[in-house]
Image: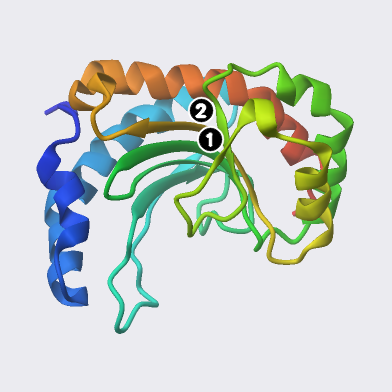
Amino acid sequence: MAFTGFSKQDFDTFQINGLDERMEAIQTRIQPKFQKIGNELVDYLSAKLGNEVYLHIARHARRTVNPPNDTWLAIADNKRGYKQHPHFQVGLFDDHVFVWLALIYELPHKQEIAKSLINHFDEIKQLPNDFVISMDHMKRDSIKLEELQLKELERFRDVKKAEFLIGLQLPQEDVRIADGDTFIETVKDVYDRLIPLYHISLQSRIPR
């Protein structure tokens, strides 16, 4: 069965009180959809990138008290994990879906990647106007691409906990979210535009 879109019930998951109760809803409502989305995107990205990539679905295993405010799938070229590698994400907060190329603080080669992105700043600024930037994957805040300045990339380079995520945020009301095929095509289009930055990030990695 194909992915049929995200529903209001999926977003309402994040209003459920209690860690166990919310996690059960994430596991039953959202993660099966992530599996369907992820399977298609893994095949798509593997073909586009010319190498195998792997699906990781957030398990929130470290949480013992506070329920998660968002959840996501990640796709990376490492089978064991994704946080220490440039990766693609699709996920939900209670009011929007995010589609990211994610470079988070756990990257062991963050400074090298940041330097490369600074060198390609003009190319980043030429991405679509509806793209946004997040500097912290734990927060829903973002800035518009047109507002991005070099200082954000310099902060990503210089501050240990700083992150850089770029892509699209779709509000809950966006009609593309509710239609599975339209949503998948939207994600593919975002990833197509971000693949050059992904390659730049990979080339800046410390050898594995």
C-alpha span from label 1 to label 2: 5 Å
Kind of element beneath mark 1: loop
Residue 122 horizontal side relative to residue 136, left or right: right
Q: Is residue 200 left or right of residue 96?
A: right
Q: Residue at x 74, y 54 (%)?
A: 208
168 vs 126: above or below: below
- Circle nearer the N terminus (1, 2): 2
How far across and down, in percent of the image, does residue 102 sit?
A: 58, 45
- Kind of residue sitting beneath label 2: Ser
Does 20 sit left or right of 109 as displayed? left
Instruction: Look at the picture and state if 31 lies above or below 203.
Output: below
Residue in the image at 75% along x and 61% along y? 108
Position of residue 25 relative to residue 150, above or below, is below
Left or right of residue 37, residue 121 in this image: right
29 lies above or below 178: below
Q: Is residue 207 visible?
A: no
- Residue at the spot of label 2: 46
Give, as a three-letter code, the residue at label 1: Glu
> Crowding near pointer 1: few (<14 within 10 Å), some, many (20+)?
some
Please provide percent x and percent y for residue 111.
83, 54
Which residue occupies the foreground of this view, 83 or 190?
Answer: 190
Looking at the rendered image, the quarter that the N terminus falls into is top left
Residue behind mark 1: 52
